[in-house]
Image (cartoon, helix red, strand yellow):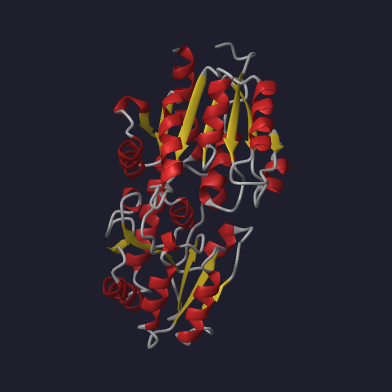
Amino acid sequence: MKENNPQKIVYIVPSLDAGGAERFILDLIRNLNRNLFSPTLVLFSHGGFFETEAQKLGIDLIVLRKRFKFDPINFWKLYQTVKRLKPSIVHTQLGGDIYGRLVARLLKVPVIVSTEQNVQVGEPYLVRCLKTWTAKFAAKIIAVSQAVKIDAKKRYGLPETKLAVIYNGLEVAKFLTTKKPIKNDKVIFGSVGRLTRQKNYSLLLEALAELKDYRWEFRLAGEGELQSSLEQRIKELDLSDRIKLVGLQSDVKSFLADLDVFVLPSLWEGLGIVLLEAGLVGLPVLASRVDGISEVIKDGQTGILFNSNDRPDLVLKLRHILENSTKPELLALGKNLQSNIQTKFDIKLIAGQYQNLYLKLLDK
C-alpha cells in the first residue's frame, strides 16, 4: 500500500455517550497512521458526551439522528453517507453492528470489521439473531478480551477463524501518575461507571454499610437508570455523609487521583477500561473475580479480587484494605498494575495491532 494513498476507514457507532469503550474509539482514531489510513467517525443515533472533544481533536465526524428503534430514514441516511465516503474498510462496534454491517454489505465495502466490547449478558433475542446474521458479512470480529471472545463465539456461532483478540488500550501519558502512600486513617474509595445492574454498586453499598466503625468515604462517578434507587438506598443505610454520587466527570484523571483505592464490583465485564485508567493513576484496585477483569487484575499481584456478588467476601476484602491502608504492600499493588498496563495496554501498541489487521485483511 502506498503511503500517499491512505485507505478510507468509516467507523460506525450509535453515539459517543460517556463510557470507556467510546473513549477508546476516539483514542484509536487519534493514533492511526494518517499516511496509511483516513478515518471518518459516523454516529448514526446522536452525538453524546464526547462529541465536543472529538470535534476539538479534529476527527472527521458525521452525526446523524435516529428517531425510533428501527428508523428506515436513519438507515437510508447512513447508507448514503457511507456510499459518498467510499471506504475500503467499515469498522462497527457498540450497537453499530447491525446497521453498519448491513450497509457495508449492500455497498460491497471490501473489508468489514467489528469489535465486541462486552460480554453480552441480557442481549435481546432479536438483536442476537440480527447480529448472528450480519456477522457473516464481517471479515473479522475482534474481541477485547478472551472472555468476550468465548462469549461471542458461543452466542453468535462464530468460527474460530473469524475471531481475534485485541485488548483495548488508552493514552498512557494522559493518566500516568505517581501515587503517594495513604497518610491519614481515612480511606477514600471510589469508582467510575454507568449506574446499571452490570456494575453491581448496590452490593458495594451494602458491604460498606457493615464497616461503619472504620473511617472511610466512597465517591461514585457516573450516571444511569439506577441512580434514584442507589440514592434511596444510601439514605436508608444512613450513609449520605459518607457516600457521594458525583455524576459524570469530564476530568476522570483528577477524580481518580483524589482516591486511595478503586473498587469495581461488576457482575460481568468485557475488560473494564476504567481499570486501566485507575491502574495508570497508580491506585490499588479491588474488583470482582469475573472473566475480563481477571485478565487485567491478578489477585495479590496487581490488585485484590473478591468472589463475584459475594457480600461477605467483599466485606472481608474491604476490611483488609482499611486495616492495612498505610502499609507499602497496598501501594505496591497499584505500582505493579501501573507497570503492567504501560507494557500491554498502551494505545500506540493497540492501534498498531489494529493497523496490522486492517492491512492483512485488505491484502486478501
Q: Residue at x 31, y 28 (%)?
A: 159
Which quadrant holds residue 309? bottom left
Image position of 90 (left or right of 161)? right
Q: Position of residue 328 (x, y in %)?
A: 35, 67
Q: Is residue 345 visible?
A: no
**Picture layout, residue 206 above or below residue 353:** below
Look at the image and tell me in which quarter the N terminus lies. Answer: top right
Disc tally is 0
> x%, y% of residue 123?
42, 48
The location of residue 12, given as percent across then percent down, is: 58, 35
Counting from the top left corner in percent of width and height, residue 140 is at 42, 27
Between residues 299 and 128, which one lies in front from this camera angle?
128
| Relative height, residue 80 to residue 14 (above, below) | above
Name the residue rendered at 47%, 41% in the picture.
346
Where 172 falls versus 289 (above or below)?
A: above
Foreground pick, 173 / 264: 264
Quadrant of residue 322 within the rendered picture: bottom left
